[in-house]
Image (spheres, helix red, strand yellow):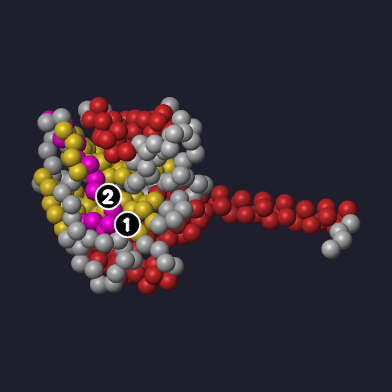
Amino acid sequence: MYMDHLSYNISKSKQDEMDKTLEREINLARNIQTSLLNGKTPCIEGGEVSGSSVPARLIGGDYFDFYPLVNGNLRIVIGDVMGKGIPAAMLMILTRGAFRSAAESTQSPGETLTAMNQAIYEDLRTLKSFVTLFCADWNPKTSVLTYANAGHNPPLLIKSMKNKIEELPKAKGIMVGGLPNQVYQELSIKLEEDDTVFFYTDGIVEAQNKDGEQYKLERLSQILLQNKDQGVGEIEKRVMNSVKEFTQGVPQKDDITMVLLKISEKKADVTSLNSPVLS
């Protein structure tokens, strides 16, 4: 089809306008996601928590949240939606709504995951997607962490006094959206002074360098042990710097998200950050 110079310029102008509109809408979506990840800061005794998420694209599908319960406990969740970019971000919003609703009406992490699965199972099946989630209740009075797992990688427990690191004992449970009518196993663990629980998504351990090598769990464990005496914000920063140094400028392929819970006798400083400060 012949297109004269004037028609070409008009067509190009319309395309440029559409591109700018799309860019504005993506930036708006990122701002909305950033605002949702930066929820209200709960006040808690007996420890400190921190959370951060760095999307592989402008917006991502990883999710974390803190929900203070009326009994004084703190409900923590971290999750990874299948996929990347705008579709994953939309499902992340769906997941967040399901978590907030379930956390308000359920008594435990396992019940929360069951309620979330019931609420969004049909939508996830329709979209041929799923979400891995790890949900935990921290009791600051007893220092007991009770948790349930929906197909997510288990958090790491850094035992400061013993200078050792290990995965939390595995709780059985399949991903949300996998099967209907699921009941999620709950386990509990007593946390001690200066213990740190590190929740994370696989974007950290699967980060790759120029040779295609992955960051892996061993390297993450080493960094966590080296910095076990630091505050949660500093640990978070050093993990991100370690990943950045390892990848050597290779573009990030997957969202990177982490949540840290550190036990102390001091009043907690509970913060929620969308992006850590990298030096």
Q: The residue tagged with tag 1: helix, strand or loop?
A: strand
Q: Quadrant of residue 206?
A: top left
Q: The residue tagged with tag 2: helix, strand or loop?
A: loop
Membership of 156 in magenta stretch: yes
Query: Which residues, given as a range, are shown in magenta?
Result: 148-161
- Residue 139 visible, this orientation: no
- Residue 102 point in image, percent of width and height: 28, 64
Q: Quadrant of residue 216?
A: top left
Task: Answer above or below: position of 251 versus 86.
Answer: above
- Residue 78 point in image, percent of width and height: 31, 51
- Residue 153 is tagged as 2
* Residue visible at 35% across and 59% down in the picture: 131
- Residue 132 is tagged as 1
Q: Quadrant of residue 8?
A: bottom right
Q: Residue furthest front?
A: 211
Q: Quick one: 25 or 1, which is closer to the camera? A: 1
Membership of 19 in magenta stretch: no
- Residue 81 visible, this orientation: yes
* Residue visible at 29% across and 35% down in the picture: 220
* Residue visible at 27% across and 45% down in the picture: 199
Q: Quadrant of the C terminus?
A: top left
- Residue 72 point in image, percent of width and height: 19, 51
| Contact? badges 2 and 1 (CB < 8 Å) | yes
